[in-house]
Amino acid sequence: MSKQQSHQEWLAELELKSKKKQESFMNGIASKLNRPRVLEKPAHPYRGAPDFWKEFTWTPEERMNQFTLNIEAAGGHVVHLSDMENVRQFITSKAAEMRASRIIRQNQEELAWLNLESDLPNTEITVWSDTAETNLRSKAAEADFGIVVADYAAAYTGSMVVTSSPTKGRSVSLLPTVLIAIIPVERLMTRLGEILVHFDGNENERLPAGIHFISGPSRSADIENDLTIGVHGPGIVYALIVDDFKPIPNLIK
């Protein structure tokens, strides 16, 4: 018998011993539970969410109420506004109240509608860009406010979905002290499944660089459950739900 055959027989013997130990272990558990062992794989007749959950939906009012309850339970704030003019007034008022000296926003046309530079001339406002500027992340880390337009929101979990791209840096929503996320009311869904279907089946090159689910301020706890807010992200989050998501007429250039 060759050395290779001897080695293979030894491995086979080890495998047999291992299986016997597994068998004994599983039989012991079944005996203690006083029931026979399950020897066949369980059937999985469903793939993904069941039909009843796919059909589950809330009315617009219910979505608004549940989203607000969930975000506020996590320590965030929800403000329902009628149009982008009211969004502009809210942001400028909050910036004055909190003495924000630095703001960074995504390079989105909808945020340009706000024309914040005209109302906050003494505030440094940075627009994220796809240029090779190396200090954008530093500016985001130093910013008092980060402003984004959410791609979607889910009422059932109280989550905002923010994607990233070369002109929508993830640092804008992850690094500033305060995050302000604008949510057009038509993007507020009932379930996460209604949102994920927009990304399902896409080729890798068509997927966003990042898909971020934000359900309130950053929260972290150590092994003793001492909760700390704002360690790994914004400590204050405002979700601004807007009914009329259109340009502000008197600010259109």
Image (spheres, helix red, strand yellow):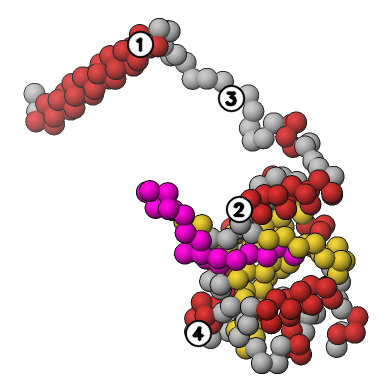
Report the residue marked by disc 4: 135
Q: Is residue 39 magenta?
A: no
Helix, strand or loop at label 2? It is loop
The residue under label 1 is which amino acid type?
Lys
For the point 64% across and 59% down, the residue is 76
Residue 70 in percent (x, y) is at: 67, 49
Residue 48 versus residue 45 in the image, above or below: below
Helix, strand or loop at label 4? It is loop
Residue 119 in percent (x, y) is at: 76, 87
For the point 21% across and 19% down, the residue is 17
Helix, strand or loop at label 1? It is helix
| Quadrant of the drawing holding the N terminus | top left
Mark with earlier residue (2, 1): 1
For the point 71% across and 88% down, the residue is 120
The residue under label 3 is which amino acid type?
His
Residue 149 in percent (x, y) is at: 71, 68
Report the residue marked by disc 1: 32
The residue under label 2 is which amino acid type?
Ala
Give the magenta part as a residue range.
221-240
The residue under label 4 is which amino acid type?
Asn
Q: Nearer the viewer, residue 206 or 157?
A: 157
Mark with earlier residue (3, 4): 3
Q: Nearer the viewer, residue 156 or 17?
A: 156
Helix, strand or loop at label 3? It is loop
For the point 60% across and 84% down, the residue is 102
With 192 as the anchor, is 4 left or right in this view?
left
Mark with earlier residue (3, 1): 1
| Residue 206 appears in view | no
